[in-house]
Image (tube, grey):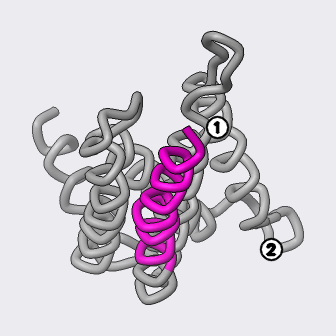
Amino acid sequence: MFDIFVDEFATPFSQVPAVVAATRLFAAMTFGGIIGFEREWRNKAAGLRTHMLVSIAACLFTLVGLEISSLEFGGNDDKRVDPLRLIEATTAGVAFLAAGLIFTAGGKVKNVTTGASLWLAGAIGLACGAGQMPLAAMATVIVVIVVGVVGLFERRHDEDET
């Protein structure tokens, strides 16, 4: 019984080597964390841990999809691998989670930016899972610029109007 358990953990990855998978997961965690840190710093509803977890989850879904694509499901004619379905499912799940953050209070809509940043953390996780760390890094920098720097200009503009 214990041998079966050990064998399951010793089984090599078929599509993505374990070290590469770990690197991608840690990259997703890091990039999601960078975005989450900015949201945490601003005391938003979804912060550091939430963004990290969403990004890691999206990365993991991509890695699992890659691994599943190598499993035997019958003949080659029976096998249908559609990476767009994986992206759609992950996007829909993260969008559902992000939409739960958005609410109306006092006639104002709140947390739309945090919901959008969470959705972007999912996309960054998908990119990491697909091995596109440079793309994920670029997107992370752009997201931080948008939510941080552009947000600063918006707040200053709002202060000038009052």
Rendered image quadrant of residue 128: bottom left
Q: Check the image and report above or below for 59 versus 19.
A: above
Mark 2 secondary-structure assignment: loop
Magenta-span inclusion, residue 65: no
**In the rendered structure, does residue 156 fall within the stretch colored magenta?**
yes
Highlighted range, magenta: 139-162
Q: Residue at x 46, y 54 (%)?
A: 156
Identify the mark at residue 93; answer none if there is no mark: 1
- Please indicate, yes or no, whether residue 112 appears anywhere in the rendered image: yes
The residue nearer to you, when weighing 131 against 79, is 131
Quadrant of image for the N terminus: top left
Q: Position of residue 51 (x, y in %)?
A: 38, 46
Q: Residue at x 25, y 66 (%)?
A: 26
Q: Amino acid at mark 2?
A: Asn
Whether residue 64 is visible here, answered yes or no, is: no
Q: Which residue is mark 2?
A: 76
Q: Residue furthest bottom?
A: 134
Please give the name of the residue rendered at 48% of the width and 45% of the height, measured from the top-left corner.
159
**Which amino acid does the dot numbered 1 rest on?**
Gly
Distance between the alpha carbons at the discs numbered 2 and 1: 30 Å
List x then y, in percent, for residue 107: 71, 15
Residue 108, given in percent of the width and then of the height, sits at: 67, 22
